[in-house]
Image (cartoon, rainbow, N blue to C red):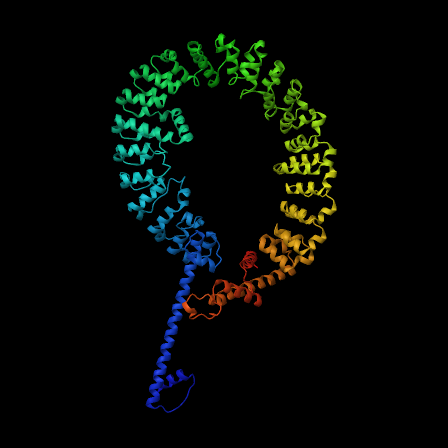
Amino acid sequence: VSVLFVMATVADGTTRHSNFHPSSFEKSETRCQQILECRRQIKNWQDKLTRLLVEQERYYRLAKLRCAAGSTDIQSAESILSWSADTHFTWSDLSWIEKQDKDFILAALESKELPLELKSFDEDVFPLHIRTDPEIFMARVHHESFEVAFRDYAGLVVPRTLCDDKNIMLEVVQRQPMVVESMPDHWRDDPDIFRSVLKHQDLPWKLLQYFSKEIRSDAELMLAVFQHRDSELSWMGDCSERLRDDKVFFINAVDKFRSHCTKRTVEGYIKLRNHNEKPENQVLRYASQRLRSDFDVVMNCVQQWGMNLEHASDDLRRNDKIVMAACTQDYTASKYALPVGLEISFLEHYDFARSIIPYVSAETLKLCLDKHGEDERFCLYAIALNKIFEWSMIPETFRSDPNFVARAAKSLSWGLWEALPLEMKRNVQIASAIVKSDYIDRDVIWDVVHKCPEILSDRKLVIDLIANRRYYADLHLLIVEKSAIDIPNDKVLMLHGVKHHPRLWEYCSDELRGDRDVLIAVAEASPDALRIVPSTYQLDHPEFVACAIRKHRKHFENRNDIKTMYIGILREMWHNRAVAMAWLESGGEWNYVDFPPRFREDEEMILTATKNSWTEFRRASVMLRRDKAFVIQALAVDARIILDVSKELFFDRDVVMAAFNKDVRAIEFHTKGDDQCFAFLVSFAKKIRRRLRESRAFIDEFIGSAKCPSAGNVGCNLSMLNQGPVMLATYEDKIASYAGILCDEEELARYEATSHHLAAWGI
C-alpha cells in the first residue's frame, strides 16, 4: 500500500486516498514506470550534457593553445570565440591541474613562443613523470626554441629513463649536438649516433674526443667529418694513429675540407685564410713521420697551405718543387726552406715572382724587380698590388716614359706625383691620369691644378671633378678660377657643381643665378642651402620653397638640420599655406610663432600636425574642437587627443567609441580621476556589452536557425527564411535594422575591440 501511495503521488503530483482496483493499479504502475524511465533518461542526458560541456571546455582550451600556434584545423573555433593569439596569456589562464595535463602541455608546445615555464621545464613546476614522458620530451626537442635555448649550454642532460632509447637519442643529438658530452658511454661507439650529430650545421668543439677509438678509426666517418661545414683541420689530431698513417685517407680528408670551404664563397675563403694563420690548423703536423716524408702528401698540403712546409721532412724542405709550391701559396713559408735562402733562386721564375708580389717585403720586391724589371706588365702589377712599393724601384727607362707613368698613375697617385720631376708634372697626359686615379687625394689634385692647369680644358674631366662629393668647396672654386672653360656661364657644369656644393652658386653668372633649374639644385643640395637663395625669389616662388622642404624630409630627424632650414626660410613665407603644409608633412612641429591664426581653423593642417605629435591637436581652434565629425576624424589619427576635445564632446558616445576602439591608451586619457568619468565608463561598458550579447543571440539563435543545413528545411524553425544566401542576407539586414541590433561585421569588430580595451582597464 505504501508503494502504491508513493506511485500515485509521483504520478499525479498530489496525495489522494482512493480505492485501487486491479485495472487502475496496472495503469498506475505502467505510468509510474514510464515516468521513472523518463527521469532516468533525463538524468542520463543531463550527465551526458555535463560531460560534453566539460569536454567542450577542454577542447576550447586546447584549441586556444593551438590557435596561438597558428593551427589551421580550428578555424571553426575561431569563429565562435575571439581568442588571444598569445600563448603566454592562454597558458596563464589554465589551472594548476591543467598545467600538469599532458594534452595541454603538448598543445602548448606546438606554439612558436613558449611560456617561461615550458622553456625551463623546472622540476619545481613539473613532476617527474611529466619531465620523463617520451612524447613530451620529444615535443620539446622538436620545438624551434630548443636549439636556441641550449645553444651555449653544454650541460644538457637527457632524463636517465630515456637515455637507453636509441630513437630519442638520435633525435636529441641531431637537434642539440652538445648532448654528446653527457650521453651514456654505450652510445659513444655507435655509428648511427655519430652520423646523427653530423646532420646538425654546428658541431661541438673537440667533437671526436667524445667518441670511442672505434669511431675515430672509421675512415668513412672521419671523411664525413672533414666534409662538414663546421669542421676543423685540428681534429685530424684526434683521429686514430692508423688513419694518420694512411696516405689515401690523409689526402682525401684534406681535399674534402678544402672543397667544402670553396663552395661557401666568401665565408669559405676567410676560413681557409684563417687556417693558414693558426699553427694548430697546419694539418701536416698531425701526419705520421712516414707521411711527412711522402712527396705526394706534402705537396698536397703545401699547395693548399704553404706554412705546412714547417712540418715536412728535412729532405722535402730542400726539394725545389715543394719549396716553390709552398712559397707560391704563402711566401712567408720560405723561412722554413732548407738551406736558408733557397727561395731566392726561385725569383728567376717569372710566374713564381709574379705570384708572390702582393706578400713580399720591400727587399724581396726589389730583388724581383731587378730580375724582371724590364717587363712592363710586371712593373705595373707590382705597382698595383704591393702596398710598400716605392717609385724608385722602377727602372729608369720606365720612369722617364710618359706613357708608362700615365698608366702607373691609375694605381699610384700620391707617391708617384711626389717622385716625378717638374717637367713630367706639367705633362697633360700624366696630370690627367693622376687626377683620374681612384686613389687620388685632395692635396694631390690641388697641386696638379696649380702645376698643370691645362688639364681643366677637358670638359668631361672638369665635370667629374666638380661632381665629386669627396672634395671640399675651396677645391671646386679653384677649378672654376683656373679652368679655361667659361664655367660660370655653363649651365650644365654649374648644375653639377651646386648639387654637391651650393656655395658655387655665388660664382654663377647673373643669368644663371636666377635660373630656376640652378636654384632648385641649390635648394636640394643641403638643408641650409635656402639661405643662399635670394629673398625676392622665395617670395615670388613659394612652391620652390615647399619643394625644397619636402626634398629634405629625411633631415627632420636631426634638430640641428631643422633649425638650419628654418633660419633659411623667410618669415613671410610661413603665411603661405603650401609652405606650411610642406613643413608639417615633412614632420616639422607647429610653428606657433610664425603661423597665422587662420591656420588653426584648417582641418587638413591640424590633422597633419596631429600625425606628427598628438599634442599638436591643441593648436586647433575652439570651433574645430567642437566639430564632432572633425574630432572623430582626428581620433582615427591618434585616439589620445580625447584629452583635448571640447566639453560638449567629451562624453559623446560616438566620440568615445571612436577613441576607445582606436587605442586602449585613450581610456587612460579619458579618465580624469573623478566620479563622473568613472560612472560614465561603467555605464558605457554596460551598454556596449549588452548590444554585443543581443547581437550574438540574434546571430546564433535567429540567423543560425535559418541556416539549417537539412534537406527540405526539415526541423528548421525559420525555414521560410532559408531561400538562399542572398535572400537570407537581405532578411538578416532588415530584421537587424528593425530590431536595432548590430549585424554589420565591421561594426561588431569595433564593439568587440572597445569591449576588450575597457576590460583591459578593469571596466
Foreground residue among 153 and 233: 233
Residue that extends furthest to the top in the rendered view of this protein:
396
Foreground residue among 724 and 483: 724
How many numbered discs sit on the rendered protein?
0
Q: Viewed as shown, does residue 350 lie left or right of 194?
A: right
Q: Viewed as shown, does residue 38 lie left or right of 626?
A: left
Q: Find residue 594 and report its image quarter.
A: top right
Q: Viewed as shown, does residue 215 lie left or right of 89?
A: left
**As drawn, 473 above or below 407:** below
Q: Residue at x 32, y 17 (%)?
A: 322
- x and y, in percent, of residue 86 in the image: 47, 52
- Quick one: quadrant of the C terminus? bottom right
- x and y, in percent, of residue 539 in the image: 74, 36
**As drawn, 726 above or below 492:** below
- x and y, in percent, of residue 742 in the image: 55, 63
**As drawn, 249 above or below 347:** below
